[in-house]
Amino acid sequence: MSILEASTRVFVDEDKLDTDAAYRFKYFAKCTDFSTYEIQFLQQHASDLFPLIESSVATAFDRALNDDSAKRFLMSRIPGYEGPIVSDIDELSMHSPIMIARVKMFSGGLYRIFCSSWDDDFIRTLAERQKRGQNWGNESTDTHLIYNECFQCNLRTELTKCVLECSSLNDRIRLVLAINKVLSILYDMGHISK
């Protein structure tokens, strides 16, 4: 049985919501009406979305560079990046190798998510990556939470604007709704405790 199939179960195991990624996703998907239809729709349009994703991610990161706390967070090394790290906060810009890598990694990851089949293994891996992604850096957890929420908001705004302004895309409203559900799911997956 797929985690996206409807369930007649009314009882919600709250402990499982905090520990089981597939269970939490199924619950969240049901509450937000995220379905296999939307997954297939995103898969169908993923290649059309990629340039918009990269542009939106770059703009969201660029906005984050206006804030010293976010800059300190963005200066830290990211998994998979072996290039130079700037040591002075004033040197960090969108042209810094770490920021170029962040844009490419985040854009590529989001593109792969849009192309994914969303099976149980994918959901568990996604939850693990989101949890790790929300816990690195040098700032406090509260600062990370604020930074992540601001980044998510900026990314949603930019991606929504880009999709709505792209006249070559069919069914733009449906795309925006599906993308926003995915971004909500991604953000939520970082909050699983185990």
Image (cartoon, rainbow, N blue to C red):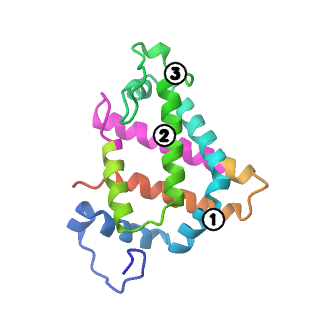
Residue at x 34% of width, y 34% of height:
143
Q: Horizontal placement of 99 versus 51: left or right?
A: left
Residue 127 at x, y percent in the picture: 34, 55
Residue 116 at x, y percent in the picture: 49, 61
Residue 160 at x, y percent in the picture: 63, 51
Q: Amino acid at mark 3?
A: Ser
Main SS of the magenta part reads: helix
How many marks do you count on the picture?
3
122, 63: nearer the viewer: 122
> Magenta residues, as a range?
133-160
Q: Amino acid at mark 2?
A: Met
Residue at x 20% of width, y 66% of height:
15
Q: Are marks 2 and 3 in contact (CB under 8 Å)?
A: no
Q: Amino acid at mark 1?
A: Gln
- Residue beneath disc 3: 96
Q: Earlier in the sequence, mark 1 or mark 2?
A: 1
Q: Earlier in the sequence, mark 1 or mark 3?
A: 1
> Could you give the CA–CA distance between mark 1 and mark 2, rounded to whole angstroms?
22 Å
- Residue beneath disc 1: 44
Q: Secondary structure at mark 1?
A: helix
> Could you give the CA–CA distance between mark 1 and mark 3, rounded to whole angstroms?
33 Å
Give neighbour class at mark 2: few <14, some 14-19, many 20+ (Cα, 10 Å). some
Residue at x 37% of width, y 83% of height:
7
- Residue beneath disc 2: 105
In the rendered image, residue 139 lying in the magenta stretch gets the answer yes
